[in-house]
Amino acid sequence: MIIAEVSALIWLVQWIADKKGLSMQRRWSVTVMSGFLIAAASVAHSADAPCAKPSTGNGEVRAVIAAIQGLEKMLSAEQTKSLERPFVRDSAIRWSNLPVGIVPREGLRLGDLDEKQVHAMRGVAAAALSACGLKMLDDIRIADTFLKAVDERKIGWDGGNYYMSILGTPSERTPWMLQIGGHHIAYNFTFNGSREGATPLFFGTEPIHFNAADVDYEPLVAQSAAMSKLAQALAKQADAKLSGTFTDVVKGVVVIPVAGKMPTGGTDTGFPQTYPTGTTDRGIQYRVLSPAQQALVRAAIESYASLPGAAITRGLVAAYEATSALAETYVGYSGAPDLSTEHSYVRIDGPRIWMELVVQKAVADPTALHYHALWRDKQSDYGGEISH
Amino acid sequence: MNARAASMLALLCATGSGLAVAHSAPNSFVKLSFLAQSVRAEMLVPESELAIATAAEGASEPIATYLLRHLAAETPQGVAWKVEVRSFSHTTYLEHAYLSAQVEFTPPAGAQAGAFVLLDDAVTHEVRNHVVVVLARAAAKPALLGALQYPARRLTIQRPVQK
């Protein structure tokens, strides 16, 4: 399986390189990076359940720090400088669901790393993420590389256009952040914050599913299936239907056009967000659902919450699934419950939890669809360490 | 084609060549110019989202009529301002088509032109993720005055202090 996937990637990279006229040295660099990515991703593919196995560090701060120290030993002074950024609002909110051609990212660009550095970088990711979260990172990056071959516009499709940043000083006691992100994923983990720090967590995929040389990928299969099962189970209950139309996630980022220049914004400048209150148009309350429906709500929550390492999300899942919290949690949907059409949407909205998934028209192939998903915590985005 | 439309077209030429916003949900922008006796607004409304909003109402009226049903201004005390849609043009920004509407807001006699409440739900009454970003025109960088997203449709506007 691994050989087949690496062969597929080499074919894909060479095809892109031929089209772009890249030098042999550049081809080799891209191939090594991507080959490592695919090989690692295929190991995760072998697991029957994406999140069945813990990752190397499982989100434990000590393991993440050790992995960062291992990475930094491999980096040049210039690379270390790009990795390390201050833990301030402007740095923390610098994530986006837009490609780097529109919203340039900061941090250590993963596509610029050599083989040993890629290995060390993945060590950091594996320490912070669950096996499921690491697989999603890999698969989404492969999707971006896949799109690079089918859409030649200078959007920034490229699995190499993903970045890692350390905000502040890694410590077992004081707050700091690890960010891993690019076009369709934004992991923002805050360690030692005043509150749990798993969010904001954006993820998406285009294409929804694709095949690269006989290997099938569906990066959001667990989350989209969980949300879809939930919506289908609610479809006969009128109270679960949300009014209006959803063309994207509701609490995402906004770009601002600037005449004659590239747009500004496109990052989390809207933080802190405001959220619906009261009982109107929030969907149906968890407490009136059947036990089977309630189980689907919890499964959907856990499909998102299982992306970071367990040490990062354990407290959050407990808070979201506390009896008192679930009693005040709403679930709603719009569009097609099976997520088969554009503008289909599913949301979980509780005292703290905000999880949404929307189906949008694809960009590279407008005849297809793609997903955006967002997990926010109304109380603990950025570990409660970032203010307005 | 008016000057603003021409500038937007120039912008398209400058930035649209091979660069697209990989984002299916563009937002609206209201750019306010504070004049002595009125407030002039350039409203950029993405046509894709506007089409969803008008279709949801089954609206077949002229676009100016539709906008005037969903757009208003009033004093902080609730007295209505006069709202006139002066002109329209169509423009493109980063591969998204926008309706550009030039709107004039005139306060009632005795009211200040620098403080009012803007009401706008032309798109947000239907598109739940849509954001109306309200900016004040400035020589250097536009100043962000606020934003509207469902269910909010009222934004208190205070003319920014000139620096």
Image (cartoon, rainbow, N blue to C red):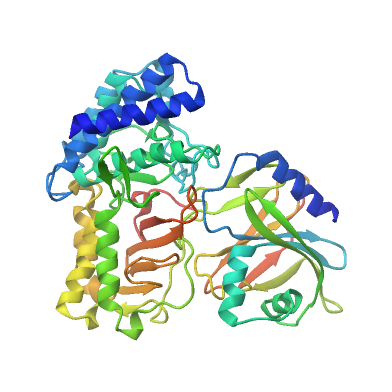
Front residue of A383/A74: it is A74
Query: Can residue A121 be spotted in the picture?
Result: no
> Residue B122 appears at what percent x and percent y?
64, 73
Residue at point 50% right, 37% down? Answer: A156
- B82 in relation to B22, above or below: below
Residue B126 appears in the picture as rendered: yes
Q: Which residue is drawn at 40% across and 49% down?
A: A206
Q: In this view, does A346 lie above or below B68?
A: above
Name the residue located 21 percent from the left edge and 42 percent from the top edge: A59
Residue A227 point in image, percent of width and height = 29, 65
Count of numbered marks: 0
Q: For the point 34% across and 18% down, which residue is it?
A: A75
Q: In this view, does A61 lie to the left or right of A33?
A: left
Relative to B16, B25 lies left or right? left
Query: Residue A82, position in %: x, y?
Result: 44, 26
* Of residues A349 and B127, the one drawn nearer to the viewer in this rendering: B127
Q: Position of residue A174 (x, y in %)?
A: 30, 39
Which of the 4 image quadrants contains residue A131? top left
User: Residue B63's image quarter?
Assistant: bottom right
Q: In which quarter of the image is the N terminus of chain B?
A: bottom right
**Residue situated in front as seen by the camera: A148 or A182:** A148
A145, A106: nearer the viewer = A145
